[in-house]
Image (cartoon, rainbow, N blue to C red):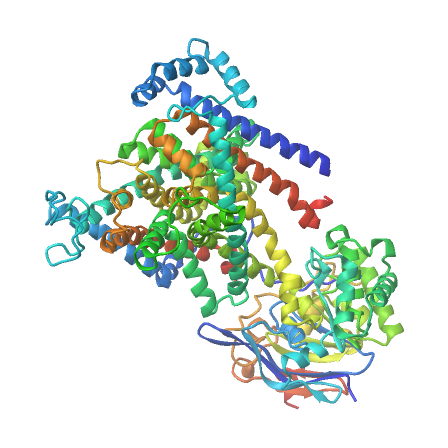
Amino acid sequence: MTTVVLSQPPGPVTGEQTPAVERGTLARLARRRMVQIGVGGLGLFVVLAIAGQLLTVNGIATGSTAASIFNPPSLQHFMGTDELGRDVLTELSAGALVSLIVGIAATAIAVVVGTLVGLLAGFFRGWLEVVLMRFTDAMLTVPSLPLIIVLAAVVGQGLGQIVLVIGLTSWAGMARLIRSEVLSLRERAFVLRARSVGVPPLRIMRVHLLPQILPLVIANTVLISAAAILAEATLSFLGLGDITRPSWGLMLNNAFKSGAAGRGAFWYVLPPGLCIAILVLSLSFIGHAINEELSPRRQRQ
Amino acid sequence: MSLLAVTDLSIDYAQLGGATRAVTSASFSMGTGSSIGLVGESGSGKTTLALSLLGLLPANGRVASGEIHYADESVSQYSETQWRRLRWTKAALVFQGGMNALNPVRRIVDQIVEPMLVHGTETTKQAATQRAIELLARVGIPASRARDFPHEYSGGMRQRAGIAMALACKPQLLIADEPATAIDVVVQAQIIRLLAELRESLGLALLIITHDLGVVAQLCDDVIVMYASEIVESASVRGIFHNPKHPYTKQLLESVPRFSGMRGVGAGISGQPPSLTNPPTGCRFHPRCPSVFSPCATEHPPASRLADKHVVACHLYGHD
Amino acid sequence: MTTASRISSRIGQTVLTLFIVVTFNFWLFRLLPGNFTQLLSRAGALDPAAVASLKQSFGLDKSPVEQYVLYIKNLVTFNWGTSYVSHQPVFQMVFQALVNTIVLITVAYILTVIIGVALGVFAGRRAGRLADSVTVTTSLALWSVPTFWLGLVLVFIFSVWFVGLPVSGMTTYAATYSTPFDQVVDIGLHLILPTITLVISSIAQYTLIMRNSLVTVLDEDYVTTARAKGLSSRRVLWRHAVPNALLPTFTLTWLNIGIFLSTTLQVEVVFSWPGLGSLIFQSVNQRDYPVLEVSFLTIAVVVIAANLLNDLLYPLLDPRIARR
């Protein structure tokens, strides 16, 4: 029987090292509405945090007299005062700084650990993979908030400790993702070639694998930072954060304990939560958009 | 009276920055029991054409102009309900390789029974099941495997089950999209024999969509060659294989590796299939055509009838 | 892989995970360098009896290995010690809290999954249209709202504007009930706000997963086949697309129990629901370590069990795995 197959349009040449991100991805991302909103929201809080450090107009503690506490918004205090007569807007800007610091620092830890674990497990296989992935699975299984609480209770409550605890409990998802990506990459021609001519493993990981997994890392970095900021806020709300620095979670903790909600002090109860929600939403918008841009479905079109 | 008549059919896909024409002014007709092969590279518009025959264009696709008739009835103004009544009873689809054409979480027999009950061609579950088992036997699948799930079948069995399913409501026309692709050569031959035998015994008309000329040679009476959304040549199988006219058709045939004859390896077609978003001017094949001459780049070639069934759209034949 | 060997390998993995968690717990509370004494001092003014029982139950004079063996033995024999604060047996406290948590999450979880999946189907079949982007955006927004704050806002609304629904606790304080039915009604009323908070906070993940899963499935050949068969669009959706799209969502419902419990913890604190979350919160603040340790272990074990259950139940739904 004669079997004839006509020429098919050429697919991507599998096995060749193609750039993981085509040019224009960044431009396409920048055109997405979600990215624009997300970057805008993020920028807003960066400005708020910096402004708060530069000009502390209404100092934090103004001495609490019966007349100065739970004041509704006024010209003197744009967002009112809290149960100790502190200016809510000033507290909010200090809280923005804490959230951004924790978001960046804890995420950095999680990303480095996650990428390292994923790379090592995926590339070297064998017992190293078994040990690393069993541990990763255990980390993924144990509910994160109780774990963070227990760790924070044991390690202590400084900002540094909080960053460490959140960072060290947020890497497991990343490690899984990177590992499965590396598993498929390591069988591709350019990696096989590099291995066959004896390029040292560390160099292969750095030169061949890292650039390929970078987009995946970036998308997840943004999402991890969103979760890290939420975790810090929750911890502070539970009174397990750094109680020496005003953060959004701590503000809500004070509001909760002082019965601000029952007294109808909406200017005190609403803004910190809205700030958390908007910052986290900005980050998840960006992460969601990057994920969409990188998904295979999108690339097929 | 023809079973299916397509007249001047054009189909557009809406996309960012304008529409893409996936099928341009296609016309052909099929009589009862006839068999036509629709041949072309992927992206030539053949699958889109097939889906439009059942009103199954994707959400961004629409018929821009032209008519489709089943018997004497035009479907241009069909509502979704009318389409639903037509589907599977007048024409049924067989998908490529059967791989994903079957629902992975439902049993084979249930998937065959379903259209019978929905269309009311069988009234009871028992009767429908009975007929489904008969159909499976007809395509060579024993009753003991009827209650299997698709993943328990081999590729060839899935394709057979797909054919049995297509026969459920006794359609007169079977549209098969790459019926023999993605399965191994021996099974491929069995599937082709099965289709030929069904056509013979049931008086089925077959519309075979493929890029495999070997399948066409064994199953079809007539051939339609599509290139970049247009029909460039149509003729009987004999006409196409022994007296091809269009340079594209000739190249298709030359790329067939022959077991007898001088050339051992097919010549292949140089160049890439054109983009439909921004097709070449004039004759769409001219950038790849070995016989290209003055009018090709600027003028669209008209279709000329060379013999009773032999029509070609090429400047080499248009100006006599 | 046969069914039996698959199951036994999964059980093996579960035991391993349990082992890792238990060991981690042991190490965390005892062997963290220099930390145990610190813990003791931070525990504040304990009465001497508590310190003595603590030292004895931890076996501080023994080697780490002996301590570990003793620890495991106490765990499996439910010999979990007594609370520093209430002097009640830890087992009793944790058990009661677990029951209360289960009362809270059962209804909320079922509602979350049903509404989440329904919204996912709603968005997924309209992919790319306005209704879809509104649903996705709203889901992301809900995911971003901190649960504890959502609870606070509800407390705010229902204690300032719409007084009537209970905003705290599991039963009305010092209430006496003439019939058991009255007690159920009272608990039911106290459940309303925590349940709403839990559902709103948790729904987004199910919606997004179900939506993405459905969008992928709707692209499959078998869905085109189903349409080509002349089935109604409703039948194509519910009989062919949704069952396939549900498979990843089903897995998520079990795997996400951990996340759901994290959310529950916050809800319990805000609404003073006397469950495991509140117990963890209290024991952290009161440095009640025996209670903290066991509450945490209990949550971990519940989640690990849910994971195992998922792996054992999944094959019943997906025929591709059942017979492999």
At which x and y percent is residue B137? 88, 61
The image quadrant where one finds the N terminus of chain B is: bottom right
- Asked if residue C226 is positioned above or below residue A231 in the image, the reply reads below
Query: In which quadrant will I find the C terminus of chain B?
Result: bottom right
Q: Residue at x 36, y 42 (%)?
A: A231
> Residue A134 in the image: x percent, y percent?
53, 31
Residue C158, by quadrant, is bottom left
Q: Can residue C148 be seen in the rendering of this structure? A: yes
Asked which quadrant contains residue B180, the reply is: bottom right
* Horizontal arrangement in the rendering, residue B115 relative to residue C155 (left or right): right
C222 relative position to C50: left or right: right
Residue at 50%, 47% in the rendered image: C178
Residue C212 shows in the view? no
- Lateral position of residue B166 relative to residue C43, left or right: right
Give the farthest residue toward the right: B201
Q: Is residue C1 above or below residue C130?
A: above
**Closest to the observer, B29 or A253:** A253
Image x and y of residue C266, in percent? 39, 43
